[in-house]
Image (cartoon, rainbow, N blue to C red):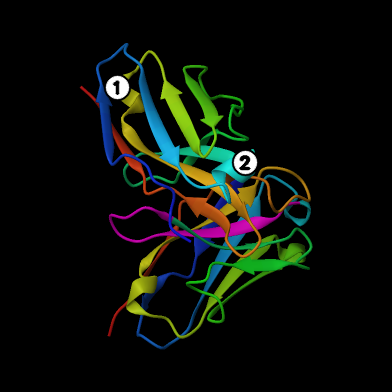
Amino acid sequence: QSALTQPRSVSGSPGQSVTISCTGTSSDIGGYNSVSWYQQHPGKAPKLMIYDVTKRPSGVPDRFSGSKSGNTASLTISGLQAEDEADYYCCSYAGSYTYWLFGGGTKLTVL
Amino acid sequence: QVQLVESGGGVVQPGRSLRLSCAASGFTLSTYAVHWVRQAPGKGLEWVAVISYDGSNEYYADSVMGRFTISRDNSKNTLYLQMNSVRAEDTAMYYCARALRHFDWSSPLDYWGQGTLVTVSS
């Protein structure tokens, strides 16, 4: 099965909001409430930012929020800060045979 | 604190084998499923495999099915990935990552190690 579809890049100025989309199918995003988002800075391991579509792990700022509509999930980052500049990956559980799918990643640039 | 430390990466010739390890600390490994995820140089994340908390279930991506084997030794707090018949396209950073919820292999990945680099080249 193909990876989930994300825009290759997004950008925003400090203080603004940006939204990153992640499009799948009814077999993955649309079929389960198990979408997660990861932040990855260069040379570092991914960090969980959102899980179960909308939940934030402790320690993740509430500027980060997640949502889902049909087969598309979204990550919104409000009040952009310089340290938010990173790659962001969505991930969805996809049931038996496929199990887990990642998106291709989105590079966020803070202008 | 929760820590996962991978080891065993290196340069391996096509067709040969390699075993990766992931040492866990700061939590009770025996109650969590654990995944392997890889990232080719300059590319995105690709899920590789998961093993249930007790080792009774293993699931693999199609790209590694039949060549890679995930296993665990809870007495040693260690996860393994046996890589056989490696190919150039297996070149990647390999991360181990813990499942978020106890006893639930289908829960999201929360803590990740720093990765170990595998290069397949003759």
Q: Is residue A97 magenta?
A: no
How crowded pointer 2 is (Cα within 10 Å; few <14, some 14-19, many 20+) is rated as: many
Residue located beneath label 1 in the image: A82
Residue located beneath label 2 in the image: A34
Quarter occupied by residue B36:
bottom right
Question: Please, what is the three-letter code of the amino acid marked with disc 2?
Answer: Ser
Q: Chain of mark 1?
A: A
| On-image quarter of the C terminus of chain B | bottom left
- The tally of labels here is 2
* Alpha-carbon span between mark 2 and mark 1: 29 Å
Question: Please, what is the three-letter code of the amino acid marked with disc 1?
Answer: Ala
Q: Nearer the viewer, mark 2 or mark 1?
A: 2
- Rendered location of residue A81, percent (x, y): 33, 18
Among the two numbered marks 2 and 1 on one chain, the one whose residue lies closer to the N terminus: 2
On the rendered structure, is A109 left or right of B99? left
Q: Chain of mark 2?
A: A
- Rendered location of residue B107, percent (x, y): 67, 46
Mark 1: secondary structure: helix
Residue B24 visible (yes or no): yes
Q: Which residue is located at x 35 percent, y 73 percent?
A: B89
Closest to the observer, A102 or A70: A70
- Rendered location of residue A103, percent (x, y): 42, 47
Residue B109 visible (yes or no): no
Q: Which residues are magenta?
A: B32-45
